[in-house]
Image: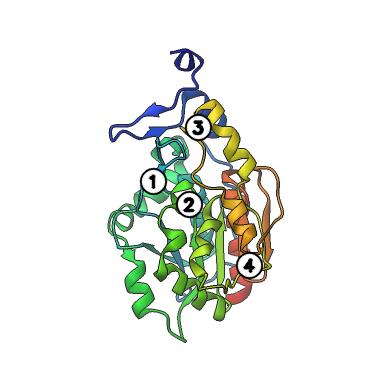
Amino acid sequence: MFKKLLGIAPNQTEDGAFSPSRLSLKLATSAKTNYDGGVYQNPYTGGKARVLVVLTEERNMMMANGKKFSTGNHPVEMALPMLHLINAGFELDLVTPTGAPAIIEQWAMPNNDKSVAKLFAKYDDALAKPNSLIDFANNLLIDNSPYVGVFIPGGHGAMLGLPSDPNLGKILRWAQKKNIHIITLCHGPGTLMSAKIDNEFIFNGYEIALFPDAVDKQTPMIGYLPGQMPFELGEKLQELGMHIINKKADDTCHIDRNLITGASPYASNKLGRLAAETLLKVVN
């Protein structure tokens, strides 16, 4: 009762999970984004270059205390990079592991942002009926591929299934071999773990921006998470040889070879522009 009065009690959902508290929503979400409009002086006009957008189809994360966190793909982390890539001239193809509908963190939706609303309306059918990682991995890993990028947004949902998905791992290893750019942010870099085979990890030694473990540890205090994380993502990635360059959940973005990463939702616009400009150098 005391937590409810303070606004720090997580909100229970219809399926028994928990979404963030009133206070944490005020602190961590906004009705509008900082999307800069996505104007590019020399966009790609060839009509062939594509970006694969990998989305989670899972909603609930089991926390260390047994409570479930209602998550999915973070709408801002997903939408702003997509808007930049589209405005830069790239075609996007959406996939989930099995082709099940993509799950969106609706509680994080910037409801007064017209650009984001327009994007979700445009991709409504694709989100409901995406293609599958299975089909892509089995049929589209070809030499003359039109794909110049793989984009994986964050949201804690990116940590559900995708870090151990063998088809995603196969796609990432293929992208690495072809020097195709991989773009991800916040908790999204956790999906890179799928590329590990036995003791070989293709991203060993890479520098990344990542949502800090220290911040995840603090968020249960204000009811953003209903409990502590099931594991520390940054610690696992460091054990695999990755180097985290940021300590704050800010707009830090970083490029290391073909890997482009951002630290948090606040990096979404900056990451989108960085990714679009980087891919334009490849195709123009």
Type of amino acid under label 1? Ile
Q: Which residue does the numbered mark 1 point to in the structure image?
A: 104
First reached walking from the N terminus: tag 3 or tag 4: 3
Q: Is residue 133 above or below residue 210?
A: below
Circle 4 SS class: helix
Q: Which mark is residue 78?
A: 2
Q: Which mark is residue 278?
A: 4
Badge nearest the viewer, 1 or 3 = 3
134 or 30, which lies in front? 134
Q: Is residue 160 left or right of residue 239?
A: left
Circle 3 SS class: loop
Q: Quadrant of the C terminus?
A: bottom right
Label 3 vs label 2: CA separation? 20 Å
Residue at the outermost bottom position:
143
Residue 73: where, in percent of width, then height?
43, 49
Q: At 52% from the left edge and 73% from the top edge, which residue is drawn?
A: 198
Q: At 57% from the left edge and 54% from the top edge, which residue is drawn?
A: 185
Q: Which residue does the numbered mark 3 point to in the structure image?
A: 224
Type of amino acid under label 2? Met
Label 4 vs label 1: CA separation? 27 Å
Q: Is residue 261 left or right of residue 145?
A: right
Q: Which mark is residue 255?
A: none
Q: Quadrant of the N terminus?
A: top left
Residue 135: where, in percent of width, then height?
32, 73
Type of amino acid under label 4? Thr
Label 1 vs label 3: CA separation? 16 Å
202 or 279, which lies in front? 202
12 or 145, which lies in front? 12
Badge nearest the viewer, 4 or 1 = 1
Q: At 30% from the left edge and 54% from the top edge, which residue is drawn?
A: 101
